[in-house]
Amino acid sequence: MSGRLRLGLVDDHSLFRRGLAELLEGTEFEIAWEAGTTRDAEEAGKNSHADVIIMDVSMPGTSGIEATRSFVKRNPATRILVLTMHSGEELVVQAFLAGATGFALKTETIDDIVKAIRLTALGRLYLAESIPRSTLDAYNRRIRKLSENPLDALSPRERQVFDLAAQNTSNREIAAELGIAVKTVEAHRVAVHRKLGAHSAADLIRLAALSGMLHR
């Protein structure tokens, strides 16, 4: 990475934002743009490239978490460092799930914030020292849960029954299709509903849609 890193600053407290900009400007960093709202940040981001966007969480209108999600959705290579006063586990997890690369606190020293910016620019995860490392465990658990396909819990025969039931096929039609007894189909459907937490055929159709089955 050559040249000075270009930064975008998003914070509705202008005094803090200006102070941070003055501390960072002229060293290894260049302030590409500043914004006091997430809407202004999105407009600024379209017009001027920033290597790292420093994002507050509590913002008027759309939150910094939602803005982070929007930036990353538009450009997955975007590096965002959340910089906030709040350090709750769920907030940290939500920030990383939204696509933030770093999570720093406003109570940290300027040297710590500089370190956070450097690591974020390199795509390396940064978490403020005062935040428990167990927070990352919570994030990793959430990632694993999101990546799991609930249909993987079904046996091969249960999956066949599910696929047909999700097409609103009757038990008698499923039995004829698979060459098994209607009562066997009913037993499989009970198991499918239990494993997937479904309560109706509509629930099965919804799960099929979420897993992409209905678009194949």
Image (cartoon, rainbow, N blue to C red):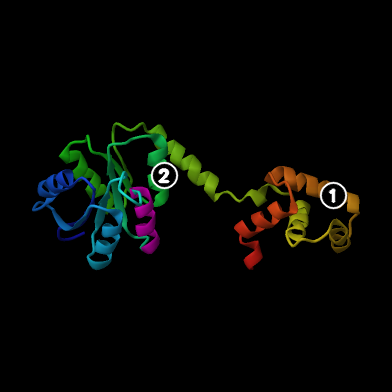
Left or right? Give the position of 158 relative to 96: right
Identity, as a three-letter code, of the amino acid under mark 2: Gln
- Sort mark 1 into few (<14), some (14-19) or many (20+) by Cα contacts within 10 Å: some
Name the disc covering residue 99, or none: none
Amino acid type, residue under disc 1 in the picture: Glu
The image shows residue 57 at horizontal and vertical percentages of 32, 45
User: In the rendered structure, does residue 195 fall within the stretch colored magenta?
Assistant: no
Task: State which quadrant residue 205 falls in.
Answer: bottom right
Q: Looking at the figure, which quarter contains the C terminus?
A: bottom right
Q: Which residue is mark 2?
A: 94
Q: Earlier in the sequence, mark 2 or mark 1?
A: 2
Query: Residues in magenta?
Result: 64-74
Q: Which residue is more in the foreground, 196 or 70?
A: 70
Query: Could you tell me which secondary element the residue under label 2 belongs to?
Result: helix
The residue pinned by badge 1 equals 186
Residue 211 in sight here: no
Dominant SS type (magenta) = helix
Question: Can residue 134 be seen in the rendering of this structure?
Answer: yes
